[in-house]
């Protein structure tokens, strides 16, 4: 279950989009007449007059579910969950329109609500995105819905706003982490994709305590994107890579391949693994020339044989 939240100024455009889709089905209207689109718009606009200073009075949420839950989600079940979602997220005492769409393969329902409450007060959107993510996770577990076992299974196309950017950062970090052997190369790879790293330092020292990632005006702590992306865990990974390289230095051909990845491969929001990038058509293969230590081993074996025969 994923919730996508937006706000706007025009009830007419939002209501028409939601209701006039070919597959749209109105499930319920709270505080509005649902007989036709004109009355719906008029009722929303009448209530917004109670708080004329609020310019963005239109609230819109789409709740999206996995295709695997399609059989479970009857209209009654979907409406029940939509009501529960609003209650948990703190959107109460206002007009709401619930409309189910079936224009996509996954089940989803649109919620249009008035940010001017029934008492004329503004319904705050503070921390709404954080609440949304928490409530969606809780309800997915509570109702026994399909729960993807990793970020790789999340439908990127269904994401918008901050959630979309967060997953873009996650995907790009995963790729950069796979090809960069140290912090410097890691930062360079992310910088090419418009992602900046922000370090948190211990007061009055140069000791790094935490890390955040910034893209398109959105900033996320590493651990907020994924538990594996805290500064401590990332630093441990790079230290381990440095240690391995000191014992098993990469060959010149491997180095050139890695450098080409950093310079040329676009880290787009595809969700591909590093292996997927390496296997793409046209990607330069490393030389098939055997490693030096293999050559030496073969020569030494030949030498041993010749020595054995001479005896």
Image (cartoon, rainbow, N blue to C red):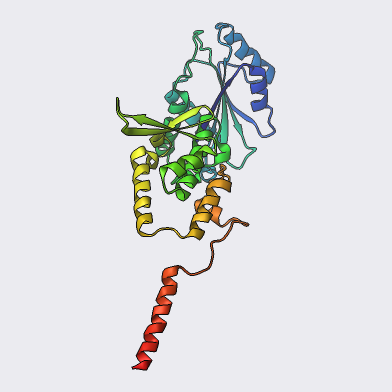
Q: Is residue 109 above or below residue 58?
A: below
For image coordinates 57% across by 15% down, the residue present is 57
For image coordinates 54% across by 50% down, the residue present is 261
The x and y percentages for residue 230 are 37, 38
Q: Would you identify the image quadrant in which residue 75 lies?
A: top right
Q: Is residue 112 above or below residue 77?
A: above
Q: Is residue 203 above or below residue 262?
A: above
Q: Would you identify the image quadrant in which residue 161 lies?
A: top right
Tell me if residue 147 can be seen: no
The x and y percentages for residue 142 are 40, 37
Specify whether 155 is left or right of 126: right
Q: Nearer the viewer, residue 132 or 42?
A: 132
Specify whether 308 is left or right of 270: left
The x and y percentages for residue 150 are 44, 45
How many labels sit on residues? 0
Q: Nearer the viewer, residue 94 or 262?
A: 262
| Quadrant showing the C terminus | bottom left
Specify whether 143 is left or right of 51: left
The x and y percentages for residue 153 are 50, 46
Specify whether 135 is left or right of 96: left
Tell me if residue 83 can be seen: yes
Q: Nearer the viewer, residue 8 or 34?
A: 8
Q: Nearer the viewer, residue 13 or 160?
A: 160
């Amino acid at each position: 279950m994923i919730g996508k939240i937006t706000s706007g100024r025009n009830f007419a455009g939002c209501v028409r989009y939601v209701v006039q889709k070919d597959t749209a089905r109105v499930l319920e209207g709270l505080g509005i007449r649902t007989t036709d689109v004109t009355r719906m718009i008029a009722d929303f606009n009448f209530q917004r007059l109670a708080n004329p200073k609020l310019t963005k009075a239109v609230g819109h949420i789409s709740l999206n579910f996995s295709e695997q839950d399609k059989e479970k989600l009857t209209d009654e079940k979907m409406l029940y969950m939509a009501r529960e979602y609003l209650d948990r997220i703190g959107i109460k005492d206002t007009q709401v329109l619930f409309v189910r769409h079936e224009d996509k393969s996954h089940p989803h329902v649109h919620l249009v609500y008035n940010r001017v409450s029934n008492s004329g007060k503004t319904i705050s959107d503070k921390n709404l995105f954080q609440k949304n993510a928490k409530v969606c996770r809780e309800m997915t577990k509570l109702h026994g819905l399909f729960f993807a076992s990793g970020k790789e299974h999340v439908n990127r196309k269904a994401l918008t706003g901050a959630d979309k950017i967060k997953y873009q950062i996650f995907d790009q970090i995963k790729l950069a982490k796979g090809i960069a052997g140290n912090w410097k190369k890691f930062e360079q790879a992310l910088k090419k994709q418009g992602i900046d790293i922000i370090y948190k330092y211990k007061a009055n020292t140069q000791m790094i305590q935490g890390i955040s990632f910034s893209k398109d005006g959105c900033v996320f702590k590493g651990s907020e994107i994924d538990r594996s992306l805290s500064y401590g865990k990332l630093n441990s990974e790079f230290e381990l890579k440095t240690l391995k390289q000191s014992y098993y230095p990469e060959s010149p051909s491997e180095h050139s391949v890695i450098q080409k990845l950093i310079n040329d491969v676009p880290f787009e929001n595809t969700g591909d693994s590093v292996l997927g990038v390496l296997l793409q058509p046209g990607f330069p293969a490393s030389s098939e020339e055997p490693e030096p230590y293999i050559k030496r081993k073969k020569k030494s074996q030949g030498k041993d044989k010749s020595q054995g025969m001479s005896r």
